[in-house]
Structures are given as structure tokens and as C-alpha cells.
Image (cartoon, rainbow, N blue to C red):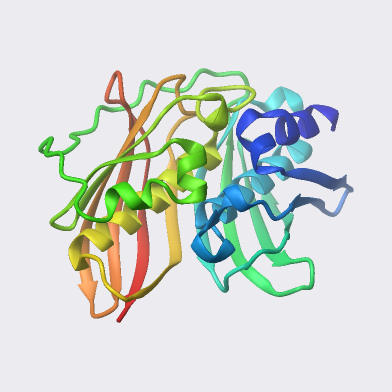
Amino acid sequence: MEAIRDWVEASPYTRLLGTKLESIETTESETTARILLPFREQNSNPGNALHGGCAATLAAVGGQCVARAAMGADAGPWHTASVQVNYLAAAIGEAVVADARLLRRGKDMCFVETEIRTEEGKSIAHATAMVRARHGADALEPQRAEGDAGDTDPGPMGPHVSKMPYMSEREMEIEHMSDSQSRIVLPYTPANADLEHGVHEGAVLALLDSTGAMASWAETGPGPYKASTPSLQAQVLCPAPKQDLVAYGQVVQRDDAIFWADATVVGALDGRLVARGTVIYRIVT
């Protein structure tokens, strides 16, 4: 259990977020974990709203904590093969708690449900995840991704969004944000690193979330709008490498205020696919 605590609290990325493993319990009938994320301004969007990437991080961390406890240390290495996060409400300037519980354990996978609430009990997000255990096997060589046309136009919003607290802390750079497309670079720095691998899964999911959101904004352009991510669906294909990551976003469907944006994350040096997903984003005039 101390190894799980070290991974949660000593991984550079989650340590900077401030995550604390409050409890982890395993019995014959259930395995649960509770993770606290205190409020920190650097984890927020303007107005002290918790960045969606932080909630996605808690879903991945909660899922892995439960899987590691249920399957034992020899089952690793692990990665979150699939996760769905539904964002129910905003946490404004307040700490949140993630309660994760095992739904089912298989030979090489665990299904985990995570509820994220404020300390007062308001529901912030609900997530389900499938965590893959490799039992010592190396990950398969990932496929190469196509990327985009290489245009570099951050548009009027890109430079300003990159300065928002959470994205600035991660040193995310919006290279392109135009014509319903986006491209964001996430550097491999201590602020984004995992204790065991390269870039932390939580940072990867936050990158996916941000890339899908920016592709949606690239279709509307700036304005006096209200916006949020109702849902994120993602697959992490392998642990992220020790290199910068690049994410490509593209709006594939729009229905009034609702946008569906596909996003892929690849290694900046080798172009290998690390993660992919769909961000459902909402922009209301």
C-alpha cells in the first residue's frame, strides 16, 4: 500500500496538484480508495473553477489505486486503457474528494467507478475506467499517427488561454487554433511527470480535454460565451514516453451549442500514438 501512496503523492505531476491518498481498503468483497485534491489556484481555470483535466486525473488515479490494490504489485505495469468522465458541476475555489471502488476484477483488467465530490458533498464528476495490468510485459510498439497539415496559427485566443493557471503550470503551448482544429504541445517536464513512466496519465487526459475544447473554440471564435466540457471519452494505449507530447484536435460534429471533437496524443519525437479520445464540449452564447 505504501508503494501506491508513493505513486499518488510522489509522482511529480500529482504532487504539484496536491493529491493525497486518504485511504485504501481491500476486503474479500470490495476494494476502495479515497483521494483528496485540495484547492490550489494553479489547478483552476479563470474564476477558480477546477480544470476538467484535474477531475480526469482523479478518475485515472482512483482507477489505478483500486486496480493496484486489488491485483497486487506484481501485476504491473498499469495504464488506464479506457475512461469516461461525465462532468456534472463545477467546483469553485474548493477542495474535492474522489471515491473509487472496484466494479469487477479480471485476469488482466479492473473496472472501477469513481465519484468526485466537493467536501460538502456536491457531485462534480462521475467516471468509469478500465485499468490494464500487463503482468511485467512490455507495451506493444504503438502505431504512428498522421498529425495535421502543420499550420501554425494560434488565433486570437491561443496566447491568452495558454496563460490560464492550470495550462500555464503544465507549460502547455497552443500552437494552432483555427478552422475547427487545434494543436497543443505538452512538454515532458517535472510538472507533468509520472514517478514510474514518462508523462503522467492525468496530464495526458488533461491534454486531450484541452485540445478538444480548443478545437471547439477554433470553430466559434472568441465571444461573450459560457463554456464547459460535459463529457470526455478517452483511451490510453500505452504509458506515455519520456518525451514531449503533441495533441491534435478536430471538430467532427456540431449541434447548436454542442461540439464533438476528436483528439489524439502522440510523442513529439517519434509520432507514436499514446492516447486518443472524444471531447464533448458546450459553448453557449
Q: Quadrant of residue 186?
A: top left
Q: Decide if residue 122 is on the left or right side of residue 137.
A: right
Q: Decide if residue 82 is on the left or right side of residue 224.
A: right
Residue 174 point in image, percent of width and height: 30, 43
Q: Quick check: can you spot residue 59?
A: no
Residue 88 point in image, percent of width and height: 56, 73
Q: Quadrant of the C terminus?
A: bottom left
Residue 78 point in image, percent of width and height: 60, 31
Q: Quadrant of residue 281?
A: bottom left
Asked whether 58 or 38 is in front, the reply is 38
Q: Residue at x 46, y 28 (%)?
A: 240
Q: Decide if residue 149 is on the left or right side of residue 73.
A: left
Q: Residue at x 55, y 42 (%)?
A: 202
In this rendering, is residue 102 above or below 216? above
Q: Quadrant of residue 2?
A: top right
In this rendering, is residue 231 above or below 146? below
In this rendering, is residue 137 above or below 20? above
Residue 236 point in image, percent of width and height: 45, 39
In this rendering, is residue 270 above or below 176? above
Q: Residue at x 64, y 24 (%)?
A: 195
Asked whether 231 or 19 is in front, the reply is 19
Q: Residue at x 72, y 44 (%)?
A: 19
Q: Quadrant of the N terminus?
A: top right
Q: Quick check: can you spot residue 44?
A: yes
